[in-house]
Image: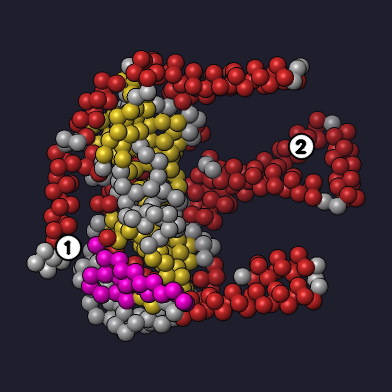
Amino acid sequence: MVRTGILLLVLSGGRPTGLVLAVLVVAVVTGARYLAWARFTYQLDDRSLVTEGGILNRTRRVVPLDRIQQVDLQRKLRHQVLGLAVVRIDTAGAGSEPEVTLDAVSGAEAERLRTVLTDHPAPGPTDPAVGPAPGPVAPGAMAGPSTAREPEHEVLTIGARRLALGGITGSKLAVVFVALGAVIGLIDDLPGGLREEASDSLAQGRRLGATAVVLVAVLALPIVVATAAGAAVLADGGYRLTRRGDLLQVRRGLLDQRQASLAVHRVQVVRIHQNPLRRLLGLMSVTLQSAGGSGQVEQQDARVRVPVLSTRELDALLAEVLPDAPRLPRLQPAPGAARRRAWVRRVVPALLVGGTVAALFPPVGLVALLLVPLAAVGGELAYRGLGWAAVDEHLVARRGGLSWETALVPMAKVQSTRLMSSPLQRRAGLATLRIDVAGRGQTPALLDAAAGDMVRLHRRTGETSAARRDERAVRRQVAASADPGEGR
């Protein structure tokens, strides 16, 4: 809203008409947002959460409590100053957006909503000690938290030093280089005189010789590393993962505080991410995927994210999240035919592109032929990243080139499997098995494995006792939650 007004002022060049237009836009947007806030209500009873909102077109949404997958809390700096929080509520069918978003409720109310909606046995009467949320709420809207509280125990904490190490070895370092690229790009937007002065300065710097360049690089490296470490600490500072009964809860962030809750029995996939540097140091990051749909507070498919942990801590985490899961086994490598396939899929396109550029733009275009050995290296890395295992009614699938992603999937959570083989795969005796689970995110897959193994595994996933037990449990839950009056 304020940014829009400032943008209009800048575009108008400071003219009075622009000032008037900016004020009108800000006033209209402010009024519309206030009306939307004033017309929004929510009501919670012992079976569902009901919201109603809209200025002209009214929308009423009913979310059964037993369909709620996750409740996330977010407190940006402005929310912390005002004592408010954002509550986002997900169901399995929420798609790319949360099922319900409460943009501005009091901190105490947000905590109580999270407790009630994640526990959701039959809620009790309104707790007068908490008080109403900002904005109109229907009479009797809120219910008190469950009285059945189990003791909370700590699963994992990550200190600032470990977070800084995670920032240096993870994706936060790439953010710094993107920022440096953006700064360099700004030079092209400078006025002519300033740009010429900057160019002259750079030319003079080049005359100083290679020693000055090396000196600048040595001085810049600590700044880049410190920036990446600081960004990681700001994003995940105070990281704490706890468990109470079936509920996992993560708290993280310094300026932008976030909380996410996830029921353990709804975990569909555990994803383990490692780049070469982290593999060397015995570190990794982990995401827990649930059946929830939006991923607005955490990452897109990361319902609960652990930014950095060691192998020993991974075993402790798996013991909490998937108690029946084995320690990560030694994976079965892909057959030799998969190496040839990985090379061909990368080298042939690189050869076509590099050869075409070299033929059209000699002799400079010959540099494009370097794509061929790079593609060969990429194919070899992609082959070495492949691996799979099936042990104790759990599937493990790994893929990737430089960076590996290992997916650990309980067979009881598998929704379906797809056995796929192209003509070239069939000729090489290979097949790919894709494992469909609930929730968003990349589908776990066993790529280019031996066809016979994949056929047997394809049959096994639908016949495991764990899958049958899970199906019976789901059927009992659906029957218990059904309206007794239906079908009469």
Disc 2 vs disc 1: Cβ atoms closer than 8 Å? no
Q: Is 205 left, or right, of 267 in this rendering?
A: right
The dot on residue 268 is: none
x 15%, y 52%: residue: 475
x 68%, y 70%: residue: 5
Give the crowd class for mark 2: few <14, some 14-19, many >=20 residues within 10 Å: few
x 30%, y 29%: residue: 419
The type of residue carrying mark 1 is: Ser
Q: Is residue 305 magenta?
A: no
The type of residue carrying mark 2 is: Leu
Q: Which secondary structure, mark 2?
A: helix
- Magenta part of the chain: 43-66
Q: Position of residue 253 (x, y in %)?
A: 49, 59
Colour pattern of the rendering: secondary structure
The dot on residue 481 is: 1
Q: Is 317 left, or right, of 123 in this rendering?
A: right
Q: Is residue 56 magenta?
A: yes
> Nearer the N terminus, badge 2 or badge 1?
2
Q: Quadrant of residue 335?
A: top left
Which residue is denoted by mark 2 in the rendering?
Answer: 215
Q: Residue furthest left?
A: 488
